[in-house]
Image (cartoon, rainbow, N blue to C red):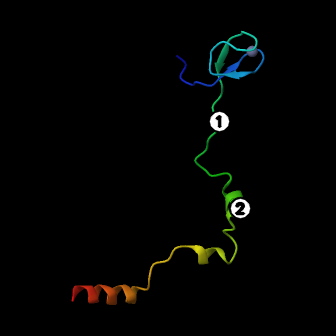
Amino acid sequence: MAKQRMQQCLSCGAFSLKTTCPSCGERAQAAAPLKWSPEDHRAALRRKMNGVEEASWPAQLATLPNLEDLKSQAASEEE
Ligand SMILES: [Zn+2]
């Protein structure tokens, strides 16, 4: 059993899950895995897509209530 399920035919280049090509019958071997990097190469595109650099973006983030309101609320609950 191959470690990677996706196989690619060595002669015609067709993709399959089998080690023999379904279109030409030749041998197929594991297709190269997708390139992966811990660095987010598309971060700039993603920020642009979500409008992160616009001035209105921070307003839509979740915020905590005012600290003084939290203190007075906790004090009233203790009584
Ligand atoms: Zn083939």
**Residue type at the position of mark 2:** Met
Q: Which mark is residue 34?
A: 1
Kindly identify which residue carries mark 2: 49
Rendered-image quarter of ligand 1:
top right
Where residue 50 appears, as percent x and y from the top left, is 67, 64
> How many numbered discs?
2
Residue at the spot 58% in from the left edge and 47% down from the top edge: 38
Residue at the spot 39% in from the left edge and 88% down from the top edge: 69
Is residue 34 or residue 57 the one in the foreground? 57
Q: Residues within 10 Å of mark 1 (few under 14, many from 20)?
A: few
Report, in whole angstroms, how far the alpha carbon at label 2 lies from the one at label 1. Answer: 23 Å
- Give the vertical position of 1 relative to 65 (above or below): above
Residue furthest to the right in view is 12
Residue at the spot 72% in from the left edge and 16% down from the top edge: 10
**Residue type at the position of mark 1:** Leu
Question: SS of the residue at dot 2?
Answer: helix
Where residue 37 appears, as percent x and y from the top left, is 61, 44
Instruction: Name the quarter where the C terminus is drawn.
Output: bottom left
Q: Which mark is residue 15?
A: none
Ligand 1 within 8 Å, label 2 CB: no
Residue 15 shown left or right of residue 76 in the figure? right
Where residue 14 appears, as percent x and y from the top left, is 74, 21
Nearer-N-terminus badge (2/1):
1
Q: Where is residue 20, by image quadrant?
A: top right
Question: SS of the residue at dot 1?
Answer: loop
Where residue 55 appears, as percent x and y from the top left, is 68, 78
Residue 34 shown left or right of residue 71 in the figure? right
